[in-house]
Amino acid sequence: MLPFFKKDFLVYWRDRKEMAIALLTPIVIIMVLGFAMPNWVENPTGDLDLKVAVVTEDDAEDGLERFRNSLDALPLAPEETSSLAVSAERLLPSAMLMQLLESEEVRAFVSAIELDEEAAMRQLEDGDVSAIVTFPEGYTLSTLNKWLLNEGEGMAVALTAEQSSTEVDMLRNLLEGFMQTVNLQAAIGFASGGEAAASNSVGLIGPVGGRETIEGFEMVTSFQYYTLAIGVVFSLFVAMTTALKAATERKERVFHRIVLTGSHPIRYLSGKIGSTFCMALLQMTFIFIVCHFILDLFPARTVQFWLGLAMVALVFCFSVASLSAVFTSLAFRLEEATAGGVMTIILMMIGTVGGSFVPRFVLPQWIQLVGEWTPNGRALSAFLQWVQQGSPEVVAAPLLQLLAFSLAAIGASILLFPRRGRI
Amino acid sequence: MVPDLLAQWMKERRSPYLLLTFIGLSVLAVVLFGMSSEGKTKIDVFLAEGTSEAEAAGWIERLNKSEAFEFVLRDEEPARAEVREGRAMAAVQLLPDDYRIVAAVDEIQGLLAERHVDTVFRQELQLRAAAERSGDPERFRLDAERILQNPPLTLHAAAPDGGEIVSYDMGLQLMFGFALFLAMFTIGSKINAVNAEKTSGIWNRMILSPVRKTQMYLGHLTYGFAAGFLQLAIVYLIFLYGFGFDLGGRFGMLLIVSALYTVAAVALAMLIAGMTKTPVQFNMVYPSVVPIFPLISGAYMPPGTITNDVLLVIGEFVPLTHAMDALLGIALYDAGWGDIFLPLAKLLLFAVICMGVGINLVERGRR
């Protein structure tokens, strides 16, 4: 086996430029993805910068004045009238919404500018602003009527945008969330019989919610997720490269000459397995180490953690190596171009269902379950679970399954390998 | 050009299964994606000790008033396993009058779900607390519901022309993204024939024949183009007629954009064929470079997720970005020729540069 192992490595070395590309692309992808994706939990709004135009067609002062005047016409006790007038001033809806937009928290990702309607429309068309918030004429009066007196139909704030996008959705959620809170207070106020403004029940409920935290459980960052997923998928390509090189050896009759020396074909196959194993492991180690040192991927982890990571990588690379044995047998059975096509198809399929090309949660449930049974899908699960829990019991089962897969694949490749005189 | 084209075609006809499988699989994949991403994100809910089924049913009903998420009751173990193994972004544990989010990966989906759950819980608990204080909980509920159904503060979202804001169709985006992505593989395997012919010596024999160089290249390029374009067209047709998706009603424009994209993809394959000398080397480089494109151009993520300037600039150099812009513009926003002119021009520029450099590299021959 050793001479074959050496031969395969020399053949790899011949294409070192291409090897370098294959080694560097995953790192480039991880870097790009890592810097592109903000850390959502710590920084929920990312670096979103939403530009909103605010158009005020309504005269709030005038609306408030008219509301006050209309109160006098109502058959209410004077103290009731005055308290309503006070709440109206305090609850001026447009002012409340503007306050929200200008609060520190919101200003971090929304910049609001006041414009007239025409300019706002023009800027929306040019894409200078992503949305327009409009307070229509008579807004203050009719909203106060509805809110404080439960009279009339009320009026809606208009949000104008050309198309929905993450940013517009954020703004919409923000405004609607705020309105919901206020509406809820109004509802509680009315239902408890008092006036809407008097009730202020927020904060009366205890703390709810939060994320479950379990001792010894670590959150996987998106950086780590991408590094693991991409490391896994690029190892798969190594299996294909090995097999395509075998196809060339068959075409150039290298294999025949090998058989003439009296070596058993199994030794040739085991050389393939050995060299693929080393190449895949090399690539994975390279990816993990470079990403760790540049991006500080796994900060402050113990030696045990790294050993476990290495263990999962070892087992997975072994299954990649046995996959390359199957591919090599295929390459000896099929025509070169067909073999390449078949391998690409197999890789695309297991890559996709195993969640290596697209994030897994995008896939439908049943494909996710199928994907669990691909070597790359299993390995990704094992990696993720090890990063989260770091307990050997949890990853033992997937690792054993990967080993079983490897043995089955090696058996299949020996069965598939053409018999004597059939090449 | 014709003889060369015929030669490729004869090879294909002798064993058409590969091309057919490629096309079949891409159709299958695209269909799966298109169907799955329609509708809501599913989130598992499981009970903590002391939470009754009836109570949970109430919460799930309230949670499911959302447009974006669908909450489904499940057993604790499978729900936790899904999260741990990265198949679900989050799950919700229901406690009596409280909840916990279980998440393993730091992701925006989980965060959005958490916000939604939080709002629902806070509102309901406030209502409950106030109802208890009021003395007549039932009447209180009715009154509060009445107000909430017709609340004082409302938001009316609309497009500038008064119509609804075009809601973003992520399924359509994934469909286009995946179709374009998979077509690159078909095109690559066809353009790789140039390298294969060079190593097997056919290329040299062709040069000796009366066929001109231009014709030889045109033969290969046309064939790669035809294979890729056919695949895309079939996918669109199945989507249009098989699944009744709304592709914007202007099929011709979609095809023209796809044709330009195919030209760009052929040019890119040619460039990589020029950089590598043998089919094996091509197969080492091409499949590792291609999967980057949909990631960089943001084909898997809702628009506006990528805000990093560097990444946006890199995305400009990816044909997929411009093709997606144009296709989604046509299918969703009724874009006219004027709107998609820029993406098309960029595609063409990309194609010209890659093709020029690529053919030059191929011509340089073996070092």
Image: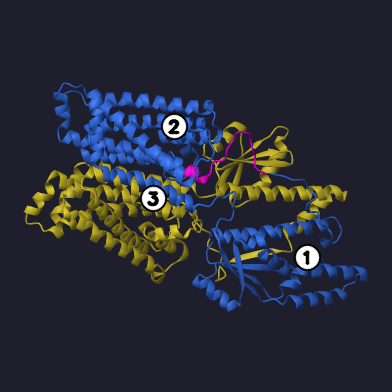
Chain colours: A blue, B yellow
Q: Quadrant of the C terminus of chain A?
A: top left
Residue marked by disc 2: A310
Is there one chain holding both mark 3 and mark 1? no
Residue marked by disc 1: A147
Which callout, 3 or 2, points to the residue nearer the camera? 2
- Magenta range: A210-226
Would you say the residues marked 2 and 1 are in contact, meaning their CB atoms lie under 8 Å apart? no
Question: Viewer-proximal residue, B196 or B34?
Answer: B196
Q: Secondary structure at mark 1?
A: helix
Q: Which mark is residue B356?
A: none
**Residue beneath the point at 87% across and 59% down:** A194
Residue marked by disc 3: B292
Q: Secondary structure at mark 2?
A: helix
Regarding residue A154, the answer to whether it shows in the image is no
In this picture, residue A251 sits left or right of residue A292:
left
Location of residue B168 with respect to A76 vertically, above or below: above
* Dot placed on the residue nearer the N-terminal end, 2 or 1: 1
Is there one chain holding both mark 2 and mark 1? yes
